[in-house]
Image (spheres, grey):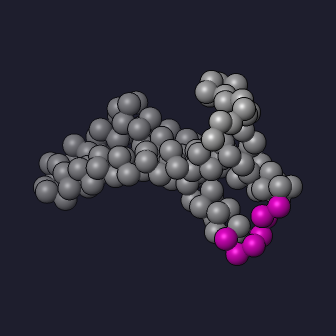
Amino acid sequence: MNSKRPVNLDLTTIKLPLPAYTSILHRITGVILFVGLAFLFWAFDSSLESEAGFNAVKETLQESAFAKFVLWGLLSALAYHVVAGVKHLLMDVGIGETLEGGLKGAQLTLVVSVILVVLAGVWVW
């Protein structure tokens, strides 16, 4: 079969709709959470080993800007992932499946996520 359709291999020229970007970001935050869990489990294990370990983890989270940034990043990924997951669950039961509903859902996902990310930043810092 000889197809005469044009083939666009330049991914930078493809325009995706907003719901596609929110879905891709949902997958990315899932990977971030999976990797971040290793660090959280390590800190949790260290804090439970002894009083000195607990104090070390506590001091690190209170004084290290990098540790606060990582914690804020993980909380931000969790917030977005939960909000986008709820949007996906609503779509699974038939709410927001239309093009207009998908766009509104993506916009609402981003707005709620930004609010939660800012609140997480205020809480961590």
Left or right side of 113 for 65: left
Residue 87 within the segment the image draws in magenta: no
Q: In this view, does 10 lie above or below 32?
A: above
Q: In this view, does 93 lie above or below 52?
A: below
Q: Residue 79: image x %, image y %?
A: 56, 53
Q: Residue 57: image x %, image y %?
A: 26, 45
Please name whichever residue, 66 or 91, is drawn nearer the observer in this view of the structure. 91
Please name whichever residue, 17 or 111, is drawn nearer the observer in this view of the structure. 17
Residue at image coords 57%, 50%: 26
| Res. 74 in view | yes
Left or right side of 45 for 19: right
> Main SS of the magenta segment?
loop
Q: Residue furthest front?
A: 1
| Res. 14 in view | no
Span colored in magenta: 92-98
Say which quarter of the image contains residue 71. Answer: top left
Q: Is residue 90 above or below residue 55?
A: below
Residue at image coords 55%, 54%: 81
Q: Residue 92: image x %, image y %?
A: 67, 71
Residue at image coords 61%, 27%: 9
Of the 4 image quadrants, the one containing the N terminus is top right
